[in-house]
Image (cartoon, helix red, strand yellow):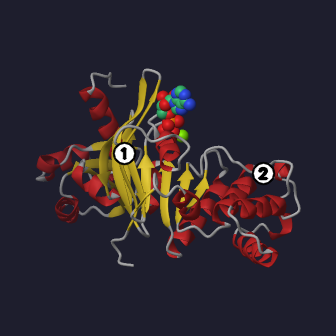
Amino acid sequence: MSAQTIAINASSLSKKFGDLLAVKNVSFKITKGEILGILGPNGAGKTTIIRLLTGLFKLENDARIEIFNKNIIDNPNEYKLNYGIVPEVSNAFSDYTILQNLKFSAGIYGISSKKEIEKRSMKLLNQFDLMDKMHSKTKSLSKGLKQRLNFCLALIHEPPILILDEPTSGLDPMSTILVRKIILQLKKEGKTILITTHDMHEAQNFCDRVLILNKGEIIADETPDRLREQYKTPSTILFKFESESGGEKLGVDISDVQKTDLKNSFNIGKKNEYYVLSSNNAIKDISELYSFCSKSKLKISGLKIVDTSLEEVFIHLIRNSDLANGGEIK
Ligand SMILES: Nc1ncnc2c1ncn2[C@@H]1O[C@H](COP(=O)(O)OP(=O)(O)O)[C@@H](O)[C@H]1O
Ligand SMILES: [Mg+2]
């Protein structure tokens, strides 16, 4: 298969709950092997899109979903064969042990050979570090362990596509790290992954592409890097002198800095021992800063550059979209 094989092609997805249009004419494609993030605040419509995508809600009007080029209306089994789903609310049976849940799930997917079920279960329990818990009842597990089981259940039929609805939401930091590691590992194995999140870092760190969703509408569809580039705000440069009072000792303080060429480029402020500059050209401005310091016999002992984060882009886009729709800026 070529790198450009389309795993999912969804077009014109919409969903109404009474008067609320929760998803508005949403279309997107996911390339095989890609991690696509759907990023949006609570209530944006992420779970509703997943439910439309996975057949839990009926498609209406012109909505169409193709999985590996097969229209699912004519091929409803394509859902079952191709998707592994980690839903918002787990569908594991709480009175079953981990192993019983795995066996039950394998049965749903039509895997009948006991040997095969055993083999796949052991492989997954190993991969997700659940071997010593296989006979524990699901209800006795911590949230992190339960989520690992949910991944096992989603993978028992070895699907090529994984659909993860906020998989790290509500997990403790250690479990979050583990789940993120697992997702990256699954990408390495060649899985196509759709993940919803309201966590900017998650989107920034491992999505190849991000759809930003607000009030049921896609307001951006880009790689995290291009989004940051497109909506770039000035970088922030923070620097400090060798000793905190070094500048003052040498008779050079912030007002001296402002008398130099730097005043054209920078709005200089101070945050604890750091001077804070806002710069549209960080490399040029840092070089000017060093030549100023050299002339003034000042030594810089700390320098940090903070670039536009996806979080800022996200807030900017959501605000603009709310404003365009007559909403209030919060
Ligand atoms: N079954 C439902 N009945 C009525 N309204 C719903 C239902 N499911 C979701 N909604 C509403 O649709 C909107 C989108 O919800 P959802 O898709 O769950 O958002 P997200 O997953 O992004 O938090 C919200 O306003 C939510 O209250
Ligand atoms: Mg949701």
Q: Position of residue 104 (x, y in %)?
A: 78, 59
Q: Position of residue 171 (x, y in %)?
A: 66, 49
- Residue 145 relative to residue 240: left or right: right
Q: Residue at x 17, y 46 (%)?
A: 258
Q: Residue at x 82, y 63 (%)?
A: 99
Label 1 near ligand 1 (CB < 8 Å): no
Looking at the image, residue 151 lies above or below residue 317:
below
Residue at the spot of label 1: 212
Earlier-in-chain disc, 2 versus 1: 2
Q: State the mark number for residue 167.
A: none
Q: Position of residue 179 (x, y in %)?
A: 62, 60
Let me know if residue 23 appears in the view. yes
- Residue 97 relative to residue 261: left or right: right
Label 2 near ligand 2 (CB < 8 Å): no
- The quadrant in which residue 70 appears is bottom left
Let me know if residue 309 appears in the view. no
Q: Amino acid at mark 2?
A: Ser
Q: Secondary structure at mark 2?
A: loop
Verify CB contact (< 8 Å) between mark 2 and mark 1: no
Q: Position of residue 61 (x, y in %)?
A: 36, 37
Q: Residues within 10 Å of mark 2 (few under 14, many from 20)?
A: few
The quadrant of the picture occupied by the C terminus is: top left
- Residue 223 relative to residue 169: left or right: left
Q: Amino acid at mark 1?
A: Ile
Q: Residues within 10 Å of mark 1 (few under 14, many from 20)?
A: many
Residue at the spot of label 2: 142
Looking at the image, residue 187 lies above or below residue 44:
below
Which sits in the foreground, 97 or 70? 70
- In front of the other: label 2 or label 1? 1
Which sits in the foreground, 86 or 233? 86
